[in-house]
Image: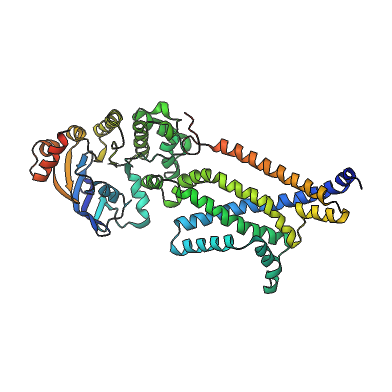
Amino acid sequence: MDPVTFLTQFLMPALWQGLIVTLELVLLTAPFGLVLGIGIALGRQYGGPALSTACAGYVVFFKGCPLLLLLFMLYFGLPTVGITLPAFTASVLGFILCNAAYNSEYVRGAIKSIKDGQMTAAQALGMTKVQAIETIILPQALRRAIPGLSNEFIYLIKYSSLAYMITVVELSGAAKLVATKYFMFNEAFLAVGVVYLVLVTLTTYGVHLLEKRVAVPGLTGKSRA
Amino acid sequence: MSDYILRVVDLHKNFGEREILHGISFNVKKGETIVFIGPSGTGKSTLLRCINQLTVPDRGHVYIDDDEITGCGHRISEYRQRIGMVFQNFNLFDHLTAVQNVEIAPIKVRKMDKTLARDKAMEELRRVGMEDWADHYPSELSGGQAQRVSIARSLAMDPEVILFDEPTSALDPELTREVLEVMKDLAKSGMTMLVVTHEMGFARSVATEVVFMEGGQIVEQGPPSEIMKNPKHPRTREFIGKISEH
């Protein structure tokens, strides 16, 4: 088969299907991973001893656990204790747990970089701790965490291919199936590589726009003056 | 009802082994400006922070009007709304413009309507001469300007008392003057103020009462004419003498 026919007739439709699955995985994971990550960072930073230790334990566990192993446990392990998750659900769950652990570290670092005086001044004005975190600390910390969080998002795009290991036919899986069927490995993998590159480049550009939009002189990067 | 807007009774605070406040008591009447002077490390700033419970005292009581602030639990944020505070390092919120800094507490804490809060914030900025800088971020302001905005931020909550914790210590003499001018006007307008400062000129011309502190205790207190010209205690005399050499 000539490469052009392979590309247009077989590979492209398969990659398109895979791309949709990959986007679903990523876009379902990211918001939950972000919210959970922020929650864990806040719990560690501002929680009492029990909550703080629990959050630190979470991070140690999920940072230490290889993602593939985590997916195997969720998909093949859980049914033995009576919980059966569809492969797609197990993947998203595994990604969220892992994504949140890393996100929480970026957010926690950003929170720690904020001067104590910000919290003190907020409390002196009569804000409760929760109000101060919500209106003063997080808006600053999240701006500073954008570079780290966006890195994590880019990793997520790429490690979402691990879902294929538990039967979810996403982008990489789709490429692998077509490549094996038609014995056209280089063509298939090169093409799928280009798709990932485009995804990552678009993300990078999007983050760049976001950073510019929320930039505050003196807080993030260069001063306006 | 007592005559006093603020009462501090036998305040004690230790940091580990170090005793910072050793039984401080004083009363403040509405409209008074009390200036705290004394060597560094004698607990003046800690005293202010104990009044609004940013630092929790080990022992003693603080009352605003007749309500006890000490040991009030989660109601502390209500009392803090009535006690403004101005910091040495300004502590303006870095992600907010000047006017946003001033309106944020009325909006979030008082649940004030946003348009009203903006008007109020602009009015307070005008009061400190910063209305032209409303849309600038803290990093774009000089120290003196930042401190004036932070005073406006306090004023926007209509506090009964404002605590000034070395408000000009981070400023050069020229910027110091512009901040002191604002504080003088405030005092004249009848605001009750507690000021920790090394600015003797300010103490002399604005204070209703000067309190000399050392070693976590009040050594001597009285009207500025008395404390600055005729200190009775030898330690006060020594301190005033040293300071006026400059």
Quadrant of residue B157 within the rendered picture? top left
Name the residue at 40% across, 39% down. Answer: B92
Name the residue at 88% across, 53% down. Answer: A182
Q: Give coordinates of residue A106: x percent, y percent.
A: 53, 50
Up/down of B232 relative to B99, above or below: below
Quadrant of residue B206 within the rendered picture? top left
> Closest to the observer: A4 or B120?
A4
Left or right of A78? Residue A60 is left
Left or right of A215? Residue A68 is right
> Closest to the observer: B222 or B17?
B17
Q: Give coordinates of residue B149: x percent, y percent.
A: 37, 34
Q: Is residue B104 visible?
A: yes
Quadrant of residue B15 within the rendered picture? bottom left
> Closest to the observer: A55 or B112?
A55
Name the residue at 44% across, 48% down. Answer: A132
Q: Residue furthest front?
A: A186
Q: Residue furthest top?
A: B132
Q: Is residue B3 visible?
A: no
Colour option used: rainbow
> Closest to the observer: B180 or B155?
B180
Q: Give coordinates of residue A43: x percent, y percent.
A: 49, 57
Q: Give coordinates of residue B39: x percent, y percent.
A: 20, 44
**How many numbered marks does the figure carry?**
0
